[in-house]
Image: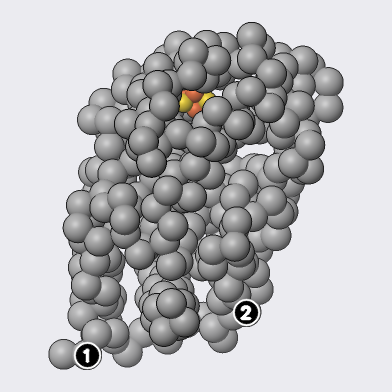
Amino acid sequence: MSRRAQFLEVLGIPTEWVPRKPMGAPQDAAAEPDRPAVVLAESEAIAESVLAPEAAEAQAPVAVALVPELEDPAPSPSIAEPARTASVPDREAAIATMGWPALDAAVAACTACGLCETRTNTVFGVGDREAEWMLVGEAPGENEDLQGEPFVGQAGKLLDNMLGSLGLARGRNVFIANVLKCRPPGNRNPEPAEVAQCEPFLKRQIALVRPRVIVVLGRFAAQSLLRTATPIGKLRGTVHSYEGIPVVVTYHPAYLLRTLTDKARAWEDLCLAREVHDRAGAQA
Ligand code: SF4
């Protein structure tokens, strides 16, 4: 059985399935769960909200709502404390120099945004910390919050099967993380200021893993990471860049569980990611 056939079998669709639109055709923003897309504005705005998150929320939001996505130093006290007590350079610079143990501890103790008050567990991320592949999702859901691990439950199983079709497995050769490390209550949309507070952690994780390719799962994560308002249908099929690392965008597994017609597109996205990964390996 071909790799494509194996993948489609995992997804539960016949191999003879034909997309409604040609591959790469633009899709509207409602192609993914119909929550408002969020996009960060300027990096300066992010820094402003890190310095004074409450003030940033009260003034101009750093995101706009769109149409209907070494040796470790000891953890810096400024990271675990509310961000309003730390300067922007202090907080971001401290995170940017952390090794894994310090970063792990800083996330576990973080109270930089209001999500710390309602979380059960922080969800740091899971997998091979020297992986060539990195997957980035949006934020923990209910099960993830309870278990402290990203992508558990049915969506997690589908993701694991998709990874398996590429010869990847969590805990072995891929690292999986979210933009946000704490669950938004009731699975509401993450607030721009929350994203701004949490992004330095993800940025540092990516810098430490140094993957050959990042696969971004879902509209919110893609638009946050790439700082764009472009719908996911238009972000797919193109290789983007985050901190110099190639990024491929695909749908969130939870969305794929509900939307049969877009499942084959996810396979195309992963094929593109594999191409990018192999190309990066050849250049290494
Ligand atoms: S979501 Fe991120 S910034 Fe907010 S408390 Fe959790 S770890 Fe800290």
Q: Which residue is pictured at 41% across the width and 84% down the height?
A: 282
Q: Amino acid at mark 2?
A: Ala
Task: Quarter of the image for the N terminus: give it.
Answer: bottom left
Left or right relative to 167: residue 121? right
Residue drawn where x is 19% and y is 58% of the image:
172
Rendered image: mark on residue 15: none
Pointer 1 residue: 2
Ligand 1 has an atom within 8 Å of the beta carbon of the residue at disc 2:
no
Using the numbered discs, state the Cα–Cα distance from disc 2 to disc 1 in whole angstroms: 25 Å
Is 76 or 51 nearer to us in this picture? 76
Pointer 2 and pointer 1: residues touching (CB < 8 Å)? Answer: no
* Displayed quadrant of residue 51: top right
Q: Is residue 263 left or right of residue 220?
A: left
Q: Nearer the viewer, residue 194 or 218?
A: 194
To which quarter of the image does residue 121 belong? Answer: top left
| 145 in relation to 253, above or below | above
Q: Residue at x 45, y 66 (%)?
A: 213
Q: Which mark is residue 25?
A: 2
Q: Dividing the image into 4 quarters, which one contains the C terminus?
A: bottom left
- Position of residue 258 measured from the top left corner of the image (x, y, whole percent): 38, 56
Q: Looking at the image, is 82 positioned above or below residue 68? A: above
Secondary structure of the residue carrying tag 2 is: loop
Dot placed on the residue nearer the N-terminal end, 2 or 1: 1
- Amino acid tagged 1: Ser
Q: Residue, x 43% and y 67% (percent of image)?
A: 212
Q: Position of residue 106 (x, y in %)?
A: 42, 23
Residue 142 placement, left or right of 82: left
